[in-house]
């Protein structure tokens, strides 16, 4: 009887519990196309209160869309090159954009007018990110540097050097204490936001190819990074300990984003798939082929809406099925930090 | 005696107050000078000139790091920055310093182009859209750099080498790249560069040194046929 319990009942019970748990964690979405750019969509960014998202494109424009309707609200033009990335300010009133024209530009979200242009990078600008208090903008460029711009003075104030190849992306921690940058040199560097420090605090090695994107979780305790081979890594911060490696995709992953639970991440790739993951366990929560290579992805706080920017110019939205979100807590918003 | 000590103290306050106010007006500029073709550090003389063309500060960038530091500059002023070296084209930039108590220094990086017969300078931001031969809107901003290089260095002659965006019929490709070359030449001549200083070389074959990628490339790495400015006479 004891052996029966040990060898039959316990495994069966465990299997049932695991199955229920796995089933409970699966999330299902409907896919819809909300609009198009005239060329490939490179960047996607959801604002802090989950009411708008912005996209940037090879067509040199930025578009602003409504959530949840997906209505095309505005097209912003002014860059003289591809707009590689975008970032909302913490108060959602401004957008900073990074372009192949070697500039960062700042735009008024309400009117779409250009407020100022930041020049100083000596090659294409790829990554851009507002600091949590909106006092600085960080940008990365193929000139191998990370530059910090004072938003009040509208000028370059500091250059962070240390990467030995093109720098691809940059992100502030939400507590405002750190900056993470990633590079074709296969590393991630963590910098203090203290304006007196010149050297990186940490260099994270582990990716075996170019690291294309980095992003802190909302509690600033984790960092997600992704590379050219589709590998995603989760790091404990500020220690820089590698927590998990996820072989997420078969192609370039240019974009990752965190949900507000600081556990769920979304990844998207040129393999046409958008995927949700539990970063604690590495479990795949959702996987969907959207039919086109994906450059950019972001999601609302509760992950009930996922926005993707595709190489065919389309902007798509994944909406969580209603029966799946019944009884779930109402989204709280990102606290104006993202 | 009491009056004397008061006078002494007041003078001290005045002197230190004035000194401190002056110190707030002063700012340093630091950064790196980079060889545009190799992205390696470059050693050049970096000089800051005020609006009266008076040299206000100068520094030689370090050959190993490219770093320079120029101090004693005034906040709120606009300076002409001149870069000089026997190994590089003379170049000029404009820098306006912010007014702020928050920063003692700000950063500015510069690029320089090697001055040697045969040196091949890639136009990093292509002035054309993919598969288009008409200068794109805003292309003038980037061609202005080439124009400035040729006007500041009047002895220099160049060959503009242009390669197509993709493999294809060589005759069609060559006609296409020649259209691009002509568009650049016209811009330079219209803006004061002498026609005799420019030779065009349009290629029907893609660039063997920097060919179109055969696999998907990451953001910002979209391929447009390379354009080189090759120095033929210095």
Image: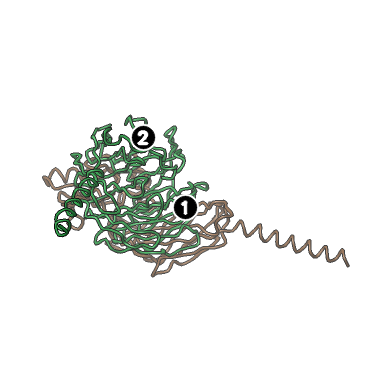
Question: Distance from label 1 to label 2 (Cα)?
Answer: 27 Å
Query: x, y percentage for residue A83?
Result: 33, 43
Quickly name the residue at label 1: A156
Of residue B80 and residue A71, the one placed in the foreground of this image is A71
Label 2, residues with CA under 10 Å away: few <14, some 14-19, many ≥20: many
Instruction: Depth check: give the residue in front, B82 or A305.
Output: A305
Outermost residue to the left: B169
Q: Residues within 10 Å of mark 1 (few under 14, many from 20)?
A: many
Residue B223 appears in the picture as rendered = no
Seen from this angle, which residue lies furthest front?
A1
- Residue B208, horizontal then vertical, whole percent: 17, 56
Q: Chain of mark 1?
A: A
Find numbered disc 2 in the image and state the secondary structure of the residue it sits on.
Answer: strand
Towards the viewer: A124 or B202: A124
Q: What's the colour of chain B in the image?
A: brown
Q: Position of residue B71 (x, y in %)?
A: 54, 63
Can you tell which chain is drawn green? Answer: A
State if disc 2 and disc 1 touch (CB < 8 Å). no
Residue on which the image places disc 2: A64
- The answer to whether one can see residue B84 in this image is yes
SS for callout 1: strand
Quadrant of the rendered image containing residue A227: bottom left
Picture quadrant where residue B116 is located: bottom left
Give the number of the disc on residue A293.
Answer: none
Q: Quadrant of residue B7?
A: bottom right
Q: How is the image coloured?
A: by chain
Q: Which mark lies nearer to you, 1 or 2? A: 2
Farthest residue toward the bottom?
B64
Classify B205 as above or below B20: above
Q: Earlier in the sequence, mark 1 or mark 2?
A: 2
B70 sits left or right of A180 in the view: right
């Amino acid at each position: 009887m004891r052996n029966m319990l040990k060898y039959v009942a316990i495994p069966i019970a465990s299997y049932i519990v695991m199955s229920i748990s796995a089933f409970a964690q699966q999330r299902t979405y409907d896919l819809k196309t909300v609009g198009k750019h005239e060329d490939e969509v490179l960047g996607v960014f959801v604002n802090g209160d989950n009411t708008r998202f912005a996209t940037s494109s090879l067509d040199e424009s930025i578009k602003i869309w409504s959530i949840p309707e997906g209505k095309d609200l505005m097209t912003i033009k002014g860059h003289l090159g591809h707009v590689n990335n975008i970032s909302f300010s913490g108060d959602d009133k401004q957008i900073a954009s990074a372009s192949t024209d070697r500039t960062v530009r700042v735009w008024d979200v309400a009117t779409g007018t250009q407020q100022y242009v930041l020049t100083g990078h000596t090659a294409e600008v790829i990554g851009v990110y507002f600091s949590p208090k909106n006092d600085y903008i960080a940008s990365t460029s193929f000139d191998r540097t990370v530059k910090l711009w004072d938003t009040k003075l509208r000028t370059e104030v500091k250059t962070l050097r240390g990467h030995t190849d093109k720098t691809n992306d940059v992100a502030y921690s939400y507590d405002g204490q750190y900056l993470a940058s990633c590079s074709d040199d296969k590393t991630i560097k963590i910098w203090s936001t203290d304006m007196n420090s010149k050297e990186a605090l940490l260099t994270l090695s582990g990716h075996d190819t170019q690291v294309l994107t980095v992003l802190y979780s909302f509690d600033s305790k984790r960092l997600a990074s992704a590379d050219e081979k589709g590998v995603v890594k989760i790091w404990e911060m500020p220690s820089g300990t590698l927590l998990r490696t996820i072989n997420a995709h078969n192609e370039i992953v240019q974009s990752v984003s965190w949900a507000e639970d600081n556990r769920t991440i979304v990844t998207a790739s040129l393999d046409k798939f958008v995927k949700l993951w539990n970063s604690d366990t590495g479990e795949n929560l959702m996987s969907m082929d959207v039919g086109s290579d994906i450059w950019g992805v972001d999601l609302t706080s509760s992950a009930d809406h996922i926005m993707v920017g595709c190489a065919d110019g389309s902007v798509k939205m994944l909406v969580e099925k209603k029966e799946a979100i019944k009884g779930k807590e109402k989204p709280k918003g990102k606290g104006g930090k993202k | 005696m009491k009056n004397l000590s008061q006078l002494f103290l007041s003078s001290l306050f005045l002197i230190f107050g004035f000194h401190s106010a002056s110190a707030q007006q002063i700012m340093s500029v630091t950064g790196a000078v980079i060889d545009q073709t190799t992205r390696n550090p470059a050693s050049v003389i970096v000089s800051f000139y005020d609006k009266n063309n008076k040299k206000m500060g100068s520094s030689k960038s370090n050959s190993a790091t490219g770093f320079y530091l120029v101090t004693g500059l005034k906040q709120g002023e606009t300076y002409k920055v001149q870069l000089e070296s026997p190994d590089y084209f003379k170049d000029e930039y404009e820098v306006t310093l912010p007014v702020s108590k928050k920063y003692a220094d700000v950063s500015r990086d510069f690029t320089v182009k090697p001055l040697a017969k045969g040196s091949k300078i890639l136009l990093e931001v292509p002035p054309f859209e993919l598969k288009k031969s008409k200068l794109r809107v805003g292309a003038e901003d980037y061609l202005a750099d080439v124009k400035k290089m040729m006007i500041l260095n009047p002895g220099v002659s160049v060959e503009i080498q242009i390669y197509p965006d993709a493999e294809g019929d060589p005759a069609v490709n060559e006609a296409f790249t020649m259209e691009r070359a002509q568009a650049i030449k016209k811009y330079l001549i219209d803006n004061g560069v002498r026609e005799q200083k420019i030779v065009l070389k349009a290629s029907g074959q893609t660039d063997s040194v920097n060919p179109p990628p055969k696999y998907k490339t990451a953001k910002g790495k979209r391929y447009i046929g390379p354009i080189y400015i090759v120095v033929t006479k210095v």
